[in-house]
Image (cartoon, rainbow, N blue to C red):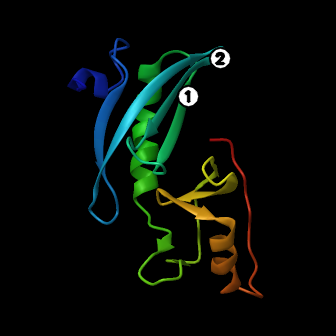
C-alpha cells in the first residue's frame, strides 16, 4: 500500500499497480486498481474497478513521472464519485438532475457502443429512452479527451 510520502507525490518510486478504496456519493466503498504506463510523451495512470465488466474508469497524465499524476488522478476519482447521474430506482433509467457525465465505451460481448455512466454501461437503446423524456428540451454535447 502507499506510504504517506507517496500521497504527496514526493516519492517517484511508487510500485504500481496499487489498490485504493474511495467512497462514492451513496456511501459505497469502491476499490480501484491503479496502473501506470509509460508512453512516448510521459506517463498515463489508469484507475479501474477490478473484476467488473464495467465500472468507473479514470485517467491522468504526467510528462515527468507517474507519482506526479497520482494526485490529479485521486482528485478525478473523488470528483467523479461525488455525483450520481443515473436514477436506477425504477425499471426505466432516468437522470437524477437533468445531466449526464461519463465515457464513451465499447462492449465487446455485444459488439456495440454505449456510455459508461456511474460505473454502469448505458446502451444506445437505454440512452434513447432516457432522452425521450426530454423531448423539446435543449441539450449541450461536449466530447473531451480523457
Q: CA distance from mark 2 to mark 1?
A: 9 Å
In the visual, does 22 lie left or right of 114? left
In the visual, does 27 lie left or right of 143? left
Where disc 1 sits, the SS reads strand
Q: 123 or 16: nearer the eye?
A: 123
Circle 1 residue: 61
Q: Quadrant of residue 82?
A: bottom left
Query: Number of marks in the image?
Result: 2
Q: Is residue 74 above or below residue 133?
A: above
Q: Label 2: how many residues lie within 10 Å, few (<14), some (14-19) or many (20+)?
A: few
In the visual, does 28 lie left or right of 34? left
Residue 41, x across and y down, in percent: 65, 17
Q: 124 or 33: nearer the eye?
A: 124
Circle 2 residue: 41
Question: Which residue is painted at 53% across and 33% down in the image?
Answer: 60
Q: Is residue 1 above or below residue 94?
A: above
In the visual, does 108 lie left or right of 36? right
Amino acid at each position: 500500500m502507499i506510504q504517506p510520502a507517496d500521497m504527496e507525490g514526493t516519492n517517484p518510486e511508487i510500485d504500481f499497480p496499487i489498490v485504493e478504496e474511495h467512497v462514492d456519493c451513496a456511501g459505497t466503498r469502491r476499490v480501484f486498481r491503479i496502473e501506470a504506463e509509460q508512453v512516448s510523451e510521459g506517463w498515463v495512470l489508469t484507475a479501474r474497478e477490478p473484476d467488473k465488466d464495467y465500472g468507473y474508469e479514470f485517467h491522468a497524465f504526467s510528462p515527468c513521472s507517474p507519482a506526479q499524476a497520482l494526485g490529479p488522478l485521486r482528485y478525478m476519482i473523488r470528483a467523479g464519485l461525488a455525483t450520481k447521474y443515473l436514477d436506477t430506482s425504477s425499471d426505466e433509467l432516468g437522470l437524477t438532475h437533468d445531466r449526464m457525465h461519463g465515457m464513451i465505451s465499447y462492449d465487446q460481448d455485444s459488439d456495440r457502443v454505449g456510455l459508461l455512466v456511474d460505473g454502469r454501461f448505458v446502451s444506445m437503446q437505454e440512452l434513447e429512452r432516457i432522452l425521450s423524456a426530454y423531448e423539446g428540451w435543449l441539450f449541450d454535447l461536449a466530447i473531451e479527451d480523457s
